[in-house]
Amino acid sequence: MDRSKDKPADRRKAVIALHPEDLYDIETYFMAEGVSEFEYDEELDVFRFVEDGRFAFCKEFADWKLLKERGYLGV
């Protein structure tokens, strides 16, 4: 009998798949509510970091590394 199936799941392997479009939709909602943590660049349709204006994400792409380094992702 294979007992490996009885072991609890490794939480490190459980990754929530967040896509740039999801992040964009969430932040668009927060922006409408007045609680966004990012600055919206309407001309380019992208979100930027308030601290230095660097690109954070748009619908098609996100700078996941920088988002993680700055503590915006709880991973």
Image: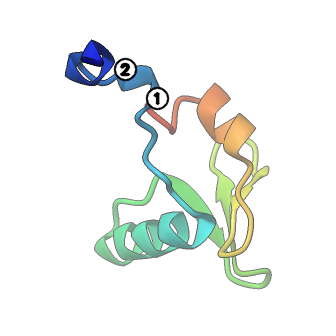
Query: Residue 26, relative to residue 62: is it above or below?
Result: below
Q: Check disc 1: other Cα within 10 Å, few if <14, some if 14-19, many if 20+.
A: few
Measuring 49% from the left and 53% from the top, which residue is drawn there? 17
Q: Which residue position is annotated with label 2? A: 10
Q: Amino acid at mark 2?
A: Asp
Q: Are marks 1 and 2 in contact (CB under 8 Å)?
A: yes
Give the secondary structure at mark 2.
loop
What is the tally of numbered marks visible in this picture?
2
Instruction: Please say which color scheme the image uses.
Output: rainbow
Q: Amino acid at mark 1?
A: Lys
Disc assigned to residue 13: 1
Q: CA distance from mark 1 to mark 2?
A: 6 Å
Query: Residue 42, relative to residue 16: is it above or below?
Result: below
Give the secondary structure at mark 1.
helix
Query: Residue 33, relative to residue 73: is it above or below?
Result: below
Taking the view exactly as shown, the residue that stands out farthest to the bottom is 43
Residue 25, given in percent of the width and then of the height, sits at 46, 75
Query: Residue 68, relative to residue 39: is it above or below?
Result: above
Residue 40, given in percent of the width and then of the height, sits at 62, 70
Residue 31, given in percent of the width and then of the height, sits at 42, 71
Measuring 36% from the left and 67% from the top, which residue is drawn there? 30
Residue 65, image quadrant: top right
